[in-house]
Image (cartoon, rainbow, N blue to C red):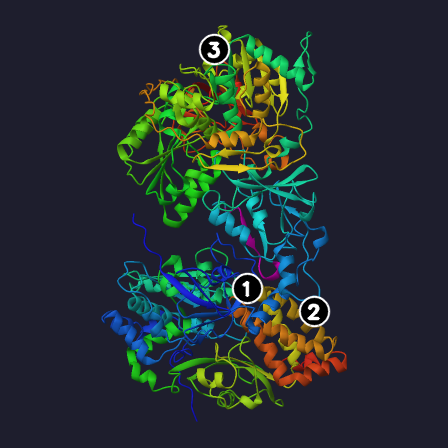
Amino acid sequence: MTKLAPVLSAHWDEKDSFTLEAYKRHGGYKASEKALAMDPDAVIQLVKDSGLRGRGGAGFPTGMKWGFIPQGDNKDHYLVVNADESEPGTCKDTPLLMANPHVLIEGCIIACHAIRAKHAFIYIRGEVTHVVRRVNQAIADAYAAGILGNGIDVVLHIGAGAYICGEETALLDSLEGFRGQPRLRPPFPAIAGLYARPTVVNNVESIASVPAIVMNGAEWYQSMGTEKSKGTTLYSLSGHVVNPGQFEAPLGITLREILELSGGVRKGHKLKFWTPGGSSTPLFTDEHLDVPLDYEGVAAAGSMLGTKALQIFDETTCVVRAVLRWTEFYKHESCGKCTPCREGTWWLVQILRDLEAGKGTEADLAKLLDLCDNIMGRSFCALGDGATSPITSSIKYFRDEYIAHLTNGGCPFDPVASTLFVGAGA
Amino acid sequence: MSEVAVEMITVVIDGFEVTVPKGTLVIRAAEQLGIQIPRFCDHPLLDPVGACRQCLVDIEINGRAFPKPQASCTIPVETGMIVKTQLTSTVAEKAQRGVMELLLVNHPLDCPVCDKGGECPLQNQAMSTGQGSSRFEGVKRTFEKPINISSQVLLDRERCVLCARCTRFSEQIASDPFITLNERGALQQVGIYENKPFESYFSGNTVQICPVGALTGAAYRFRARPFDLVSTPSACEHCASGCDMRTDVRRGKTLRRLAGEDASVNEEWNCDKGRWAFKYITAVDRLKVPMIRDESGELVEASWPEALAVAAEGLKAQKSAVLVGGRTTHEDAYGYSKFARLALGTNDIDFRARVTSDEEREFIAAHVVNSSTTYRDIDKADQVLLVGFEPEEESPIVFLRINKQFRKRALKVVSIGSKESIAVEKLKAQFIKVAPGQEAAAVSSQNLTDKSVILVGERASESAGVLTAVAGLAQSSGAKLAWVPRRAGERGAIQAGAIGNLLPGGRPVTDAAARNEIAALWSANSLPSNIGRSTSEIIAAVHSDEIGALLVGGVDPLDLDDNHSALAALDKAFVVSLEIAPSAVTSRADVVLPVAAVTEKSGSFLNWEGRARSFDAAVNDSLNRSDLRILSMIAEEMGTSINLGTVTAATKEIATIKDWQGERSKMKSVSALPQQNLSTNEALITSWRRLLDLGTLQEGEENLAGTARQTAAVISEKRAQALGVADGDLLKISTAEGFVTLPALIENIHDDALWAPRNSRGSQLLTKLNAVHGEVVTVVRA
């Protein structure tokens, strides 16, 4: 059985893991030293060879992304780190930055060197004030130690709390001081990104994975994971489980294995449905316990690996209610730029509210699915697509439950039964 | 600059091949085939945004199909591209139908009470692309409606489909990003900054390009249904930019004017003055019947024969001159020009009802008449030099064109003046700051090439030597030169010879061959050969009894320097006034003859390029006649026919006049005056007319006036310190003539200068100070 493979999280359990001292104790900033002595193209090749793929959701090969930056163009290049972690269920970058902010800074140095950038911007969501403080301190410490400021600068930018700003071009607009709305592509950020300069936008975890690759080599990284999904990654387990948290394992581990490692679904209950990569990935049921959690495996089963946010729901959960809550989130977070997402989410919520309340007929399910069809693949960015995923997948697996709401004249579930405080004080 | 051959690309759309230039968007390539893909946010003159998603089509390139439908307004054609629109793809058809249904989810569907109903892209495309009824049974989002985003533009946020045309126009075309999209999701809305209304000179274009009824103009709101309007292509009478326009009339009343399309001139835009300043046409005090002054000195109504007889007699009895303002059509100006020479036998005619100089008249004959600099030259220029010219205030479409090139390719703009203007800031122009009156030296020191364009405004005549310097610079550098007057009729008046030194077609009056050509055309034995008097000379000649009668058409004497003298001359002389409304001239006239306003007659205007834009009467049942018809009748009455009974006759006659091919008259060099020494409380005044001010053609349009820029007296930081004033403190600015009191505004201006608007509320410099540029004024804290 595949076991945990802590690389990023190897020292999280040490009390001072977030300090420069602790980071150096475990060989921190050796990788950047090594990388800075290498030819930048060799660093890009190394990352390409390692098979590292973007950990923000789409799984685009990181080295290839770096390779897109035009060289010798006499323009400033920028590295932008997407730390605007906002996908419901996703909570990997926040603990990573709390426990080990220096690994991100070191990754920034290496990536900047590789793409010939002098500036890295970390765009972090504004709600996580504790993380902001910690990363700020780490950056200050790195400057004080002379690690930063010698040709490479890192700037922390605090977002204002918009889900859309996790979309890379909206993030760039926000970083430039505009309202966060996705940009038309092309031009792609690699050609005209931040301030219209060649820019690489990477997820926190992707950049944080680089120092270990530089230290241990591409082959070492290749040795973990599956054929096309190399290395280890953080799986964020939450919901109706005994021990929620971060589980770092090679790509390709299954939910069954992770549940075994984490003590399983809460006592007396059984798995009903789960998300493999956050709320915008089509949900899975207990038939998918053995799906390998790598990019290809999840896709083959009809969903997406996404951010590897495993949200676990047991049989006490009303799927209609859960889906409605997610849809309300998307309605709230739709940026408003394009019609399908803006108007579609407004409408979806109203239909789902009616369905949850037992109002309507089976024809409304058809309307709901047709509406999703008119949003999916029609919106400007992936936010609209993501909004339809929980709806279409839940109707696919739990159509009877939707109909039960209609025949029952309301939700057949006791919402209290799904809470963690059920039974407490009763 | 050699023109690079454009690469052509062939694509297949719905089974038909079309070949278009590389870079063409799919939606536009489809238009070439007559395939109309529905759209809202797409606009050919704005950057693509891909927001509305209405134009989704299926695309494959070299056999590789896009996995999902693509917005055809954002994708340029590529070799090997096969496009299937709603006509041949069920996926595209459903996608479009779906988007249309979604667009209507939050739309109030209040078409029956919406100004846009009947000409609404949303309404039309909902019919063509939508479904008969909505499946939406929920609650629509609501907003307070409508809200004023300026005194002239109203916003109904419920109707808005958030296509961002208005915000993109304001940012990309006008460089006035005063409106933006705020909030998010379905609550996203167009908005303004708090207490910063949408006061752009170009705001009306957003109303016109709004694809729904979200933006409406206060002037037209609830006035008509589009299908009750009769539309006539027309030309704008306000400035020399030369906009194509459309005039919409309902039951004989002009209700709306819109920007027309002319890619060479105004593209699809116009300014708010051109769009909204037309109330003067329907003003209640319009002159309708002729009037003559009776024995008691009162103006009384008279029959046409009676009035014409009195006019003819008065003009015949004494030496007469013609003052014709710069607002007549080319044909009417031609009528005045011919009337002066044939009926009055004089070259004493001048269209320049403003501050002028003899240097300017010579400049006009030597460099303006028959000149051929165009907007296209701005498009190709390596730099543009502005002299005595504020394009945004004085010829807004020239500003838009320069701005387009600035945004597209960072066109270098240099402006010589005393005060940095908003347009100079927007164009990131190099501002060469000189004391009022000292522009000539700055002009001469410019380095231009034969790819450069010099745009010189009519205010250049207010500093001696500037036009001489401009002509010299054009000569030495080979740069293209254009003189951009403010009024719509000035270039036409020049071409028609409504000035003392020129006959039609640029013929010098002093050239015998030139005179003979026109004399032959006019069947006249001879034409007067001396250079005629200018406006100020004509006025002086009235005072010295050399001229006894004046024929005055469309002149406001308050636009002249020393208007006391002008008014006194009008009091003294026998005056025949051709006017549309009571004025300082009609109140002093002996005969008042009502004439047609621009929408009531046909004709043409020549813009600053010399480009003609002809138009038909938009209001057909008007009893008012064009100036030249009346001039013809007076001439008949005087016993001299000018044979211009109709505009058509004038048009035909003008068409036979070729540009003068002989030698142009030369201009005498004029030197700049020496710099004046100023004492502490003295400043040199400088000013220009703002686009929106107290101009007579803007009368009666209060909503428009509400968007005018604030009146203030601009001084430099240094002067402010010397006076101990801050922004907003009142300044008293005085001359021997009088004074004005204005709030101070500290900006980038020459330390010796003080700027104030020339004809804005509280700042009517000609009448109050008789000083507009270069004169010494006293400035103290009020």
Give the residue at mark 3: B540
Q: Mark 1 points at which residue?
A: B53
Q: In which quarter of the image is residue B383?
A: top left
Q: Give the mark, 2 or 1, whose residue is nearer the N terminus.
A: 1
Rendered image quadrant of residue B647: top right
Q: In this view, does A299 lie above or below B260?
A: below
Q: Give the range drawn in magenta.
A: B177-187
Q: In the image, are marks 2 and 3 on the same chain?
A: yes
Q: Quadrant of the rendered structure where residue B312 is?
A: top right
Residue B135 - label: 2
Tell me which amino acid carries mark 2: Arg
Crowd around label 2: few <14 · some 14–19 · many ≥20 (10 Å): few
Q: Where is residue B579 in the image (x, y as percent from the top left)?
A: 60, 23
Q: In this view, does B164 lie to the left or right of A296?
A: right
Are the residues at dot 2 and dot 3 in contact (C-beta closer than 8 Å)?
A: no
- Kindly report which numbered mark, 1 or 3, lies closer to the viewer in this rendering: 3
Distance from disc 1 to disc 3, alpha carbons, whole Å, reads: 68 Å
* Foreground pick, A191 / A265: A191
Q: Residue at x 68, y 78 (%)?
A: A365
